[in-house]
Image (cartoon, rainbow, N blue to C red):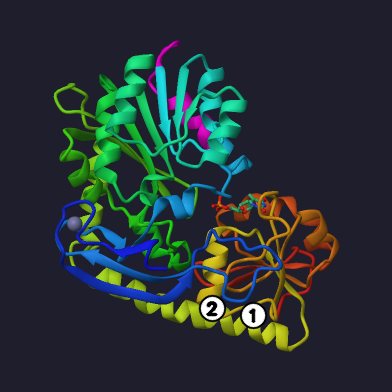
Amino acid sequence: MQEIVRKADGCRVCGRDDWLDVVSFGETPLAGDFLDPDAPIGAERRVPLEVVVCRGCRLMSLRHVVDPEAMFGHYRYVSSESETIMSHMRRLVADADLAEGDLVVEFGSNTGVHLDLFRRAGMRVAGVDPARNLAEIANARGVETVPEPFTGRVGARLTERHGRARLVLGRQCFAHIDGVHEVLDGVTAVLDPGGVLTIEVPYLVELLANDEFDTIFHEHLSYFSLGTLRTLFGMHGLDLVDVRTAPVHGGSIVVSAAPRGAGRPERPAVARMLAREDALGLSGDGPYLEFARHTEAARAEIGDLIRSLAAEGRTVAGYGAPAKGATLLNACGLTREQVLFCTDTTQLKQGRLMPGSRVPIVSPEEGLARRPDYFLLLAWNYADEIIAREGAYLEAGGRFIVPVPRPRFVTAPSAVPAP
Ligand code: TMP
Ligand code: ZN
């Protein structure tokens, strides 16, 4: 294992090596290691999963860093084309201040599904993603994608080839990247002086407020507040210009920054959010230690609930096989003894096992046909969309358990209340 993991030498934002210990999940399997059904016991790569906060810039982070090639070289997470995400994306495209022919560069562009929306709106697009299997899919659909990590060198190459970008976009990938300074070198190498960098990350404040402990896994190296992003961007001559919240992935922020001196005014939302972070005490230790206490309580509560349902002879399955579902099952000590299977729409996951818990993954059609008494909604970030779609399952007496922030049951309005 030593070859793919190392302890961070210092904070990836400010370089300081002085940490507050927040919570530890022990040595846990990599959440993206969906196993072959015949993989021998112990085939999962296990790595310490420890959450810390930098006493310098207050970045919440994992203490250990897994080699990105080991996690992303062949990646089974395919960008969501769910209604929740597509409508969010359409809004991002509509809100972008762009003209026809402008260049949009996206890093972490996955299969190119979102750049395709910009292309259809008349922009030129270029993607960058280290997952070679996904970059290939993007290239095949006509979204030119560089199959590499985003760095200053890649940014310079893109500029040479396409000119400067009016928008550089990084959606739900910035928190996965250890070399954030290299990425920002890439940004400054390709961003037009009058252009905008837009980064979308899960918001630390939502994670803490909703006890989203299952979103902590090895791929998620950083848990950003706006204050820490301001520090980081500032080191690269980029000033915050806007921020808004977005109801995706457990509550995210879409943060825009522009080259200093470009004269873009800072929208009032920026100062408001920074003031709120101050008021919440993010610069002290309190909120993080409280989160750690809530996490321990939630792990026990969810684990006990599912174990007691299984002990009563109820059938329980997982709905969705997201990385956070793998984390949740392992953190709560659940295995295929209590959770019979997980459904997932991603073909790359079907037929495989969840790492650690070894729960088999099946297609949604197969899972629904097996009609478990309860679906544990591991993909709870799509709860509204999924519950609305699965009315027939609910009407037939099926129940959802939404695990986060605290487990709650969802039944059809006409059904008997759950125990
Ligand atoms: P994500 O939260 O990281 O986007 O992962 C969600 C996972 O859940 C992904 O593997 C796709 C799966 N999923 C379903 O199986 N059914 C659904 O309806 C949705 C929205 C997602
Ligand atoms: Zn720091």
Q: Per the image, is 90 magenta?
A: yes
Q: Is residue 20 left or right of residue 154?
A: left
Tell me which amino acid carries mark 1. Ile
Residue drawn at point x = 16 percent, y = 64 percent: 17
Residue type at numbered disc 2: Cys
- The quadrant of the picture occupied by the N terminus is bottom left
**Given contact means CB atoms under 8 Å apart, are the residues at marks 1 and 2 in contact?**
yes
Mark 2 crowd level (few <14, some 14–19, many ≥20, 10 Å Cα):
many
Residue 415: x %, y % from top left: 79, 69
Position of 326 relative to 167 (above/below): below
Residue range in magenta is 88-102
Q: Which label is found at residue 306?
A: 1
The image's mark for residue 67 is none
One can see residue 329 in this view:
yes
Question: Which residue is rendered at x = 42% and y = 80% of the image?
Answer: 296
**Picture coordinates of residue 360 (x, y %)?**
71, 66
Toward the front, the furthest residue is 3
Residue 246, x across and y down, in percent:
44, 44
Mark 2 sits on what residue?
A: 332
